[in-house]
Image (spheres, rainbow, N blue to C red):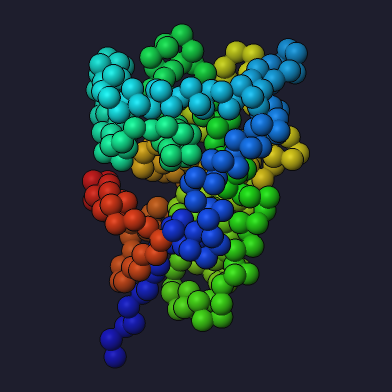
Amino acid sequence: MQDEIEKAILIANGFDIQVAGDDYLNKWIIVRMLAKAKMNKYDCLFLNTETQEPIITGDEIIEMFNNMIDVANEIRADQYDEIIERYNSGSDEIKEAVKDFKKNYDYELKSVEQIGMEDWILIFLLYLIKEKDILNQYGAIKKGFVCMILDAIYCEGTIQNIYQKLGMKLKKYFRRFDKIFTLNYDNSMEKINMESVFHLHGEYESEGQDEESYCLLSATMKDENILYQYPEEMQHCNCSAILDFCGNRKYQYASEVTVIKEKTGKGYDYHFKEFENLAGQLTIVGLATKVILRTITALKQK
């Protein structure tokens, strides 16, 4: 008798949107983030170590995002190409990200919510590269932005209740798979099937790792007079979730932290080895076709 073929499924954010509604569309995540910034919820993320006062307030955060619309359109208009060429010698990572940015936004950008959450990370980086003297603040700015976005995605905890909207037929469907891989941060699949759920981009229920154990970003997080901290009301953002402007950066970061986990027991396993070594049948749900093709191409290059 022939052995049964292993069945795996890869789930992306399109699934959460389909099940839970527009709250998890990029547009409303960004709108929610800015609304919370307006209420000064995020002031505590950017504190001066000496005065304990916010270096940037909610209104200033909103103003900064609105000003970055001009930067985004300048990137579209090739005005950053020469700057990137000078800065990015020996690496095509940023160039490729900018090329994708131009393809995705072949129209004039007029509002903050038009721009994808991870594309904002690229915009901030390019702006700081142009300004030069504040480039050393990129680590802290990125960390603060990621925290704000995760808080908006978390949506007051409702994202962890998505599983309650799944009917019995859908729950039975997911239980048919031997392995469940997900790009989502919520833990809905664990509520359905407690075994063999692998988060490739991290999850909310795992604590964030000690920055000192990370080799990729820790050096950039020590900007002078900037204290990054997770106050009690933001602890849900202190997790293993990854956000970045290109897949290769996510892969590098995930691989490095996974190695730390394997060697010292400190870190988080992002399970890319399990995904790369899959044999059998893979079903993909909630992922755009162009993203699937980019993912397959990237994995073939490893």
At which x and y percent is residue 234? 69, 39
Quadrant of the rendered image containing residue 284: bottom left
At 61% across and 49% down in the image, what residue appears? 154
Looking at the picture, tell me which residue is in the foreground, 180 or 63: 63
Left or right: where 175 falls relative to 56: left
Looking at the picture, tell me which residue is in the foreground, 273 or 21: 21
At 29% across and 91% down in the image, what residue appears? 1
Q: Which residue is at the far bottom?
A: 1
Figure label count: 0
Would residue 134 be visible to someone looking at this image? yes
Would residue 261 be visible to someone looking at this image? no
Quadrant of the rendered image containing residue 177: bottom left
Up-down relation of residue 53 to residue 35 (above or below): above
Looking at the picture, tell me which residue is in the foreground, 279 or 77: 77
At which x and y percent is residue 180? 46, 66
At 39% across and 64% down in the image, what residue appears? 285
At 64% across and 14% down in the image, what residue appears? 225
Up-down relation of residue 37 to residue 254 (above or below): above
Left or right: where 37 falls relative to 106: right
